[in-house]
Structure formats: structure tokens, C-alpha cells
Image (cartoon, coloured by chain):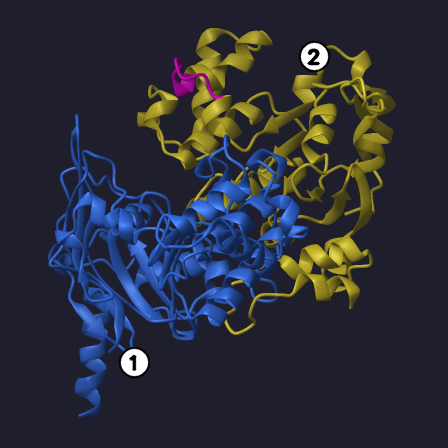
Chain colours: A blue, B yellow
Amino acid sequence: MDALLDVRNLRVELPGSQGTVHAVRGLDFQVKRGEMLCLVGESGCGKSMTSLALMGLLPRAAVRSADRLEFDGVDLRGLSPRQMQDLRGNRMAMIFQEPMTSLNPAYTVGNQLCEALRRHRPATRAQARDRAVYLLERAGVPHAPERLRQYPHQLSGGLRQRVMIAMALMCEPSLIIADEPTTALDVTIQAQILRLIRELQTEFGTAVVFITHDLGVVARIADRVAVMYAGEIVETAPVGQLYAQPSHPYTQGLLSCIPVRGRTPPGSRLAAIPGVVPSLVDGIDGCAFRNRCAQARAACAQTPPQVACGTGHIVRCVAVSRALRETRESTV
Amino acid sequence: MTEAQDVVLELRSVSRHYPLKRGLFREPGLIKAVDDVSLRLYRGETLGLVGESGCGKSTLARMLLGLLAPTSGSVLLDGRKVDAQSRLALARRIQPIFQDPYSSLNPRKTVAQIVGLPLYLHGVGAPAERRKTVAAMLELVGLPPRMHDRYPGQLSGGQRQRVAIARALILRPSIVVCDEPTSALDVSVQAQILNLLLDLKAEMGLTYLFISHDLGVVEHLVDRVAVMRQGRIVELESRERLFAAPAHPYTRMLLASALTPEPGLGIPDITKEITA
């Protein structure tokens, strides 16, 4: 497999006054060239920490470790901060949730877009400006040449996010990490921005790691999905497979929580997942979901096995592994 | 739901305008946050109010609660003008639940104190009786006794929203204005809170005004839907009809942009949807 990004046993630990928070607990995943991988999970599941760990942007106190962390053949673990800077914004770029906090309010849009290119490429001002105008137009920003002179606060939220997308594309990166890029936007704008990300991704052949909590967005945009819970990936599958046959009890629970037109009778009780997410301080033994799981059993106190239950469909669950073994034995 | 035609809350061409700052070279102008809105809320129904940010839905909610006076028009509660009634009398009839329980709960009071405060302010019952009422209400919203002495900072988002709901219902109001009550919550917790709101409505015979931008949630919960855009209500229809055959182009656009968890449908092209 031609993996652009290869991650094995990624861990992020944040030492705190009340003990160490194990925010990311052993992630394994790959991203192929030109692929859209969605990391989906609820708040505190470690999805944002994962993205920051990949970009080398973790808080200073955080400790990152991994058995493998390869991007396009480069081992990210051995890179100096300086070498990471040469990579960020160049071959890997990031789009954040709130563009107002990641755009510099003191510089014009044009200034920031051109800097993104000239930091990494030997381009003249005029070349950088031409590329900025081209990408703003591609990102659906009207009156692109005039926008270059504007400051971020003069733009609406949707336009700002379009500028961020154009900026991420300035150096034609092979990987973009998008962390909840449409969560702060209204639904009509969200649909437009998602469409734009998908179109540009196809056009430029960029791989995207798309981080979100919204299963509606995931269904429409992903090629492959990794469901995260308490710092772990509990299920990975191609998008169609995940929604047709969710196998981990957490994934099943999440999907049945959302009212869907035509499927959920209005006013009926929704299947809620009881309880709350466990604390990640001092780590967790065994399956992190077992205290909320209807299928929990004694064996769940041990580290759950990884079970392949279809092409590219991997589940971390004792119950699934048992059920699969039983069906296999009965067919033999 | 409209068969009884029992109007509990009525808006009669209510507007709320804000003057724009005048500058040397700027024309004096007005922002019409809410512009000539007439709306009736019937006893026992759930009316959904949907629209995008800045459309005036929260301004409308604040006027219903008597927290903001309309520039023109009137808000009638049981046929009486809201601004003519005292805040206390109003609070017994209509209560809010806001989006962010973090900012609407006093961090220095315990759960039991927060929920009991309205009873104290309204002089309802003796202290021992109040404690009983509070305990019963907390049980109703699903907060076990061990939570009673905790502070908001020690609770999860869902638990905090349960506290906010208990406080809103402790005076047994008949109308609850829910302003994006689950928008700050994770989906698994959102389902718990939506179930709770449905249960409480059945149990206490409540009338809800449910403000949300999430059309899936609105469709699940409400009887009628009002669609708001730029301060005006552009469409008001029963749930079945609005979702089956939206009449206004803006409603059609909103419905088209809602992303249901169905893979294979792709991302809707909004610009095409409007012209279609």
C-alpha cells in the first residue's frame, strides 16, 4: 500500500497537577495519497491532539511517542523544530475550526497568503500574488484581487474559511489536516465549504485528514472513517461499510443517537448511550467503553483484540471477535 | 396540536430595531433584528424556530421572556401584555433553557442551591418543604442525590444542562423557551437531553418553543416549525408539511444543506438547489 502517512502506536501524554492525561493511547492508521480519512469522535476523545501531534504543534508540556510516524517517507520523530517548520505549510498544511484565531489580524489577506508561498518557495512577489488570486478564485472568493488588500476582520466567517483553505493550498501540500473546519459555520455555508474541500481535494490530489464530531458530515465527505473513543481508534472502515454495518457497540450507539428523517419516528425515544466518557488521567486498562456498553463482559477488562470483519474494516472489541469466531465455527 | 386553539403566548407584529452608529460619512440606519413578527404558541405544543446565526431567533426569545422590550408590537401571555406584568409573575409562567449551561449556572453555588433559588425568591414553601421539592425535581431530571452538593465545575456538560432544566422547571412554569439546548453537547449526550425534554413535556404538560439550527433535532421534537430569516418569519407550517413540501426557497435551501448521516448522497450543491 502506498501510504502517505503511516502512524503506529501514537501516544500523547499531558502531565498535569492531577496526574498524567493519556489523551491519545496507541493509534494505528495510514492515509493513502489523495484519500479523505475522517477521524470522528466526541469531545475529549483525542482527535484534536492527534492532529496537533502529526503537525508537531502539541503544547510544550505534552509528550509524544510513536513506534512509527512517517510522512511521505520522512520519519517525523527525528525532525528538529526547524525541519518541522520547513514541512508545515509546505508539504503538510492545516485548516482550523475558527479562522479568526489562526489568521493574523494585523496583516492583510494578501500578505499572509503570499508569505505562505514565499516562506517555502523561491517565488517573486508578483508570482506569489498571482497564485494567491488564482487560489482565492478557486476557493470561491468573489473579487479576489481586491480581497488581498483586506484584513481578516473585514471578511465573513465563510469567506475567512475560504481564505484559510486557499492559504493551505498555496504550496500544493500532499496532506491537509482539517480540524472541524465547518463547525463554526451555518448549515448552508457548511455545505458550500465541504463541497469546496472535496472538489479541491480531487483536483489537486491532496490527502485530507478530516477531524469532526458530526456523523452527517462524515457520511457525505469521507472515503474512510476512523471512530475514536477515549484516545483510541475503536473502529475503522470505508464510509459505506461503517454506516451499513457499524460493528463496535460505541459506533452503533453513536449512529442510533441521531434522529434521521424517515427512519426515526418523530417524538420517539432516541437510543442514548448511558453514562459519560471515562477520565483519561492515569490511563485505562482494557476496553474504555465497557462501563457504558450493553454487551460488556468480564473479558472486556483485558485489552480488546483487533478484529478484521471485512475489507479494511477493523474493530477493537471482544464481543465482535467472539461473534465472528462463532459464525466461523458454525460454517466450518 | 392546534385543535384546541388555546393560545398561551402571542406575538403581535413585534419588532426590535437597533440604530446603527452614526458617523460623519455614514448614513443613519437601522438593523431590524426582529421585523414585524406575529406568532402564536398553542397550549401543549412544541413550536420549532429555525434559522441561521444572526436571523433574530435569540432576540425573539429574549422578548418572549420579557428580558428585552420590543421596539414596537406586543407580546401577550395568556392574553395579557408581558411588559405590564411583574418579572416574578412572568417567571412563574415562562422559563428559559439556554445553550451554554457553563455560563448560566453560578459556579459558587451547589446544584441544590441553584435549583432551589427560584423557590426562595418566590417565597414558595418552608425551607424543609423546598428541600423536598428540589430533591424531587433533581430526581425527575435524572440527577442522583450524590450530585446535590456538587458545584457546576464538577459536572459534565450533560449534567449541567440537566441542572439548568431542573432550575427552569422548579416553579412549574407552563411554557419553556429552549434556546439551542443541545448545541453545545456531544451527540450521545444530546440524545439523553432530548429524551428528557420529551419525558418532561408529557409529565408536566409543558409548551415548548424550541429554537435550533439543527433540522434533524427540530423534526424529531416539534409539532410546527417557523423558519426565520433576516428578522422575519418566512414560513410557518406543520412539521409534516414543512419537511415534505417546503414552500419558501429559503426553507428549501436550509433543508437541502442539512447533512443526514447517509453516505453516498454526496454534498449538496446549494447554489444549484436554490435555482432549481
Asked if residue B165 lies in the magenta stretch, the reply is no
Q: Amino acid at mark 1?
A: Thr
Instruction: Provide residue B104's location: percent of width, then percent of height.
Output: 51, 22
SS for callout 2: helix
Front-lying residue, B206 or A143: A143
- How many other residues sit within 10 Å of disc 1, few (<14), some (14-19) or many (≥20)? few
Instruction: Provide residue A104's location: percent of width, then percent of height.
Output: 46, 35
Can residue A55 be seen at all in this image of the molecule? no
Can residue B198 be seen at all in this image of the molecule? yes
Screen quadrant of the N terminus of chain A: bottom left
What residue sits right under mark 1 in the picture?
A: A311
> What distance separates the C-alpha of mark 1 from that of mark 2?
63 Å
SS for callout 1: loop
Front-lying residue, A267 or A54: A54
Q: Amino acid at mark 2?
A: Arg
Instruction: Indicate which disc residue B87 carries.
Output: 2
Left or right, B175 with respect to A240, comes to: right
Instruction: Tell me the subunit letter for badge 1.
Output: A
Left or right, B55 with respect to B100, comes to: right
Question: Which of label 1 and label 2 is nearer to you?
Answer: 1
Asked if residue B106 lies in the magenta stretch, the reply is yes
Left or right, A40 with respect to A23, comes to: right
Magenta range: B105-112
Instruction: Provide residue B85's location: percent of width, then percent of height.
Output: 78, 13
What residue sits 60% from the left and 49% below the top? B214
